[in-house]
Amino acid sequence: MNTGLDVAQLVSRIRAWGQELAFSQIGVTGVDLRSAEPGLLAWLEAGCHGGMDYMARHGLTRARPAELVPGTLSVITARMDYLPADTPPDWTGRELQRLQRPGEAVVSVYARGRDYHKVFRQRLQKLADRMAADIGPFGHRVFTDSAPVLEAELATRSGLGWRGKHTLVLDREAGSMFFLGEIFVDLALPPTEPVSDHCGRCSACIDACPTQAITAPYRLDARRCISYLTIEHDGPIPSELRPLLGNRIYGCDDCQLVCPWNKFAQRSPLPDFDERAGLGGSALTELMAWTEAEFLRRTEGSAIRRIGHARWLRNIALALGNALHTGLPAAEADAARAALQAWADHPSEVVREQVAWSLRPARNAAAARA
């Protein structure tokens, strides 16, 4: 590596290369995250991580980049917009309307295209390779939601946005519809400036959360979060929360859909994030009919695949139960019951229990009203 390196010029070049690789923004921050440690510990001690045991297991490593990757002196942060290129101007309203159609399956916008882990990681590595071609070999590792890293903390410290009250990172020109990733490097690079908070008195995200998972500004209890329950959680979904999931079968975008800043959300130039057939606007009964082989085929290269077929069926069965509780037209109700009955003897106890729950609409509807 060139020992006479002009690091300020290097950061400028990294930002230019990042733009060529479809990154929306590049930032740089140091590795001293000690001020974030008390909040992380309090969150873990309160059990807000739910069944994500790995978060407690890694503990403070998350706030100590130089322990995770020895020799790390700086972190290059990146964000990448993910709204499909053909997203209409009134997309938030359209997404909210989906929630009013109980027979329609709702998959979080970010998961309707290719698995972002693969897209982002490959492009981060290309950025690192471009740096090496320019300055010579250097120590580095790339991450995107793939290691014990405080991604939002690093992003805000490096100026990619501020932490919204829903705990996601927000940018004035891009809202929150973007992914985050990092390159840990053994280079001492000048940090980029953080930006100020622009949430003000707004509490739209807190008010909109269906399960009240945002327990206070900047505090999320994963145990109540629909994204956690439908993706990370592998057991039965708590019965008191089931009616609140509605027709959401993978993730939840509600807190982002009501955020005023997302009127500025940017479209991705990459076709990777374009919506796949079957993952937007499909009937619950149609998706419930997927065999495991069909599930694996249709979700190849998708983030959805990692939850497995049984969890997929559990989520859809729950949504079908909620649809039945709302009072579907007779023909649709019959189709929903038939779709559920087809999996009544599934090998998974979790699926069987969920199917049985969903096939008792009168009792469940009364519990939901209570």
Image: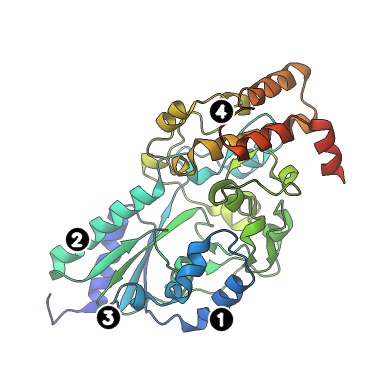
- For label 2, count other residues whose C-alpha is less than 10 Å away and answer few (under 14), some (14-19) or many (20+): some
The residue beneath circle 4 is 287
Does label 4 or label 1 sit earlier along the sequence?
A: 1
Q: Label 1 near label 2: C-beta < 8 Å?
A: no
- For label 1, count other residues whose C-alpha is less than 10 Å away and answer few (under 14), some (14-19) or many (20+): few
Q: Secondary structure at mark 3?
A: loop
What type is the residue that disc 2 sits on? Arg
The residue beneath circle 2 is 130
Question: Residue 273 lies in what quarter of the image?
Answer: top left
Does label 2 or label 3 sit earlier along the sequence?
A: 2
Question: Residue 100 lies in what quarter of the image?
Answer: top right
Q: Label 3 near label 4: C-beta < 8 Å?
A: no
**Residue at the image point whose x is 56% and y is 76% from the top:** 41
Q: Secondary structure at mark 2?
A: helix
Does label 4 or label 3 sit earlier along the sequence?
A: 3
- For label 3, count other residues whose C-alpha is less than 10 Å away and answer few (under 14), some (14-19) or many (20+): some
Q: Is residue 8 visible?
A: yes
**Residue at the image point whose x is 13% and y is 63% from the top:** 133
Q: Is residue 90 visible?
A: no
What type is the residue that disc 1 sits on? Pro
**Residue at the image point whose x is 28% and y is 65% from the top:** 141
On screen, residue 250 above or below 163: above
The residue beneath circle 1 is 38
What is the CA distance from the residue labelled 4 to the residue labelled 1?
43 Å
The residue beneath circle 3 is 188
Q: Where is residue 187? Give x, y as percent.
A: 24, 77
**Residue at the image point whose x is 86% and y is 43% from the top:** 369
Question: Residue 2 lies in what quarter of the image?
Answer: bottom left
What type is the residue that disc 3 sits on? Ala
On screen, residue 245 above or below 181: above
